Amino acid sequence: ILSQINARAVAVAPMKRGPCGDPAPIRLSGIGANPVVKISPPAIVNCAYAARLHRWVQTKLQPTARKILGEPVTRISTLASYACRNRYGRAKGKISEHAKANALDIGSFKTADNRTISVLKSWGPLEAEIAQARYNAQQFARRRAAKAKGKGDAGDQIARQTLLAQASLRRAAAPKNSGQKSGPVPKFKRGRLRPKDDTNTAPQSRFLHQVHAKACGIFGTVLGPEANKAHANHFHFDAIKRRNRAFCE
């Protein structure tokens, strides 16, 4: 497998700890070519996983980085690779793919011109936050319209409602927005992520959304900030085998 990809890797002794481990793990410190992407700190993974990561880096990550950021990625900062534990570190439940050296958590990327693109800082507002703000703005506009019915100029009322709704949406886009009332949130489609291509969105955010979405299908599980709070600061890619389509959020 390694002879067919560009990988800087050294063999690690076979691991076995209860249900955890892998018979032929590697320590991966670099992947891809022109340029080689440094894996920092190096990740303990299996060879088949390294092959999937290589495919994603060469065919998805680097083309997207060059198109949106104007520079290739030179470093991937990892938060976790091999770890003998259950999913989410729970005492009971299914074993994590991390325990099989079959997963990687990515916290940020560094480009050739020394920019750091952090998942936590650059992802942007969550779809749930945007939907919540839109819902709040609509409810507010309806209440204002009901109160203003028969009072004053209708055109002025509509203009005011529009401005207030826009302000609500802008507040939702703030990184630490947290004061919204409860309301409906969007239902995520598993296995059918769509890359974010809004040209009005910051390039770093578009880059993260697209490389995250394009990992779906290469990896068996793709998780990011939209999945849950546990993944607010990183991408989780694992190579679990699934009968149907990949699980992507």
Image (spheres, rainbow, N blue to C red):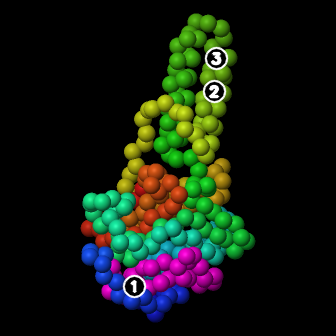
Q: What is the secondary structure assignment of the residue under circle 2? A: helix
From the viewer's side, name the closer residue of 225 and 71: 225
Which residue type carries mark 2?
Leu
> Residue 240, position in %: x, y?
33, 70
From the viewer's side, name the closer residue of 103 and 162: 103
Q: Which tag, 2 or 3, sits closer to the chain's start?
A: 3
Q: Which tag, 3 or 1, sits closer to the chain's start?
A: 1
Separation of residues labelled 2 and 3 (CA atoms): 11 Å
Q: Which tag, 1 or 2, sits closer to the chain's start?
A: 1
Q: What is the secondary structure assignment of the residue under circle 3? A: helix
Assess whether residue 46 is covered by the magenta stretch: yes
Task: Write the start and end of the magenta stretch as one range.
Answer: 21-48
Q: What residue is shown with label 3?
A: 157
Q: What residue is shown with label 1?
A: 25
- Position of residue 162 relative to residue 198, above or below, is above
Residue drawn at (69%, 74%) of the image: 112
Q: What residue is shown with label 2?
A: 164
Q: Main secondary structure of the magenta part?
A: strand
Answer with the quarter of the image where residue 65 lies. bottom right
